Image (tube, grey):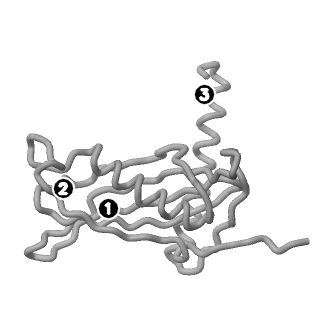
Amino acid sequence: MSEEITKSPKQSAAETRHIVMPDHTNHYGTLFGGTLMSWIDLIAVMVAQRHCGREAVTASVDKLNFLEPISLGDHVILKASANYAGRSSLEIGVQVSKENPYTGVVTRATTAYLTFVALDENKRPCPIPKIKPESDVEIRRYENAILRQEANRNLIKKIKDNGKV
């Protein structure tokens, strides 16, 4: 019997930065939500591909919270890591902060959770490495991801039981 492959979240984690330019903003001078969503999806897919070692596609955006507006000229810092892995899918958490480039003040602006599915050469879901959290933060994120998975399953079951799906 072969040993199950595991990876720690830090093995596939990613970080990137952007500067908010005029073409990224709406008429209020703040970052378009859709632009930020695309940046979130891009960093999340990089983490998913690194964790899975293969093609991975967005299955769902499970939660997206806009906490603070991001303004023209702000630096945007996106940090993403794999929180939990099932058989062929995994949850990626993305934390978005804004940084004032003149004062250095950093504020959490957005949080997001996305689910990705790994695909084989025939574009079918395939097995992926499990997550092995190591730090206290990674363990907390892993445990919280399990709670979110259970809550999603329970919600789907309730909706089906009500005949709404």
Q: Nearer the viewer, residue 31 or 112?
A: 31
Upstream in sequence: badge 2 or badge 1: 2
| Label at residue 159 | 3
Given the image, on which type of amino acid does mark 3 rest? Answer: Ile
Give the structural element (helix, strand or loop) at label 1: strand
Q: Residue at x 50, y 64 (%)?
A: 47
Question: Can you give x and y, in whole percent of width and height, for residue 165 in the image?
Answer: 61, 22
Question: Can you give x and y, in whole percent of width and height, for residue 88 in the image?
Answer: 68, 53
- Please name which of the two marks, 3 or 1, marks the residue nearer to the observer: 1
**Disc 2/disc 1 C-alpha distance (Å):** 10 Å
Given the image, on which type of amino acid does mark 1 rest? Answer: Val
4 left or right of 165 in image: right
Residue under label 1: 96
| Label at residue 70 | 2
Upstream in sequence: badge 3 or badge 1: 1
Give the structural element (helix, strand or loop) at label 3: helix
**Disc 2/disc 3 C-alpha distance (Å):** 36 Å
Furthest-top residue in view?
A: 163
Given the image, on which type of amino acid does mark 2 rest? Answer: Ile
**Disc 3/disc 1 C-alpha distance (Å):** 32 Å
The answer to whether 92 is drawn above or below residue 15 in the figure is above
Q: Residue at x 12, y 72 (%)?
A: 101
Q: Nearer the viewer, residue 157 or 71?
A: 71
Q: Residue at x 64, y 68 (%)?
A: 131
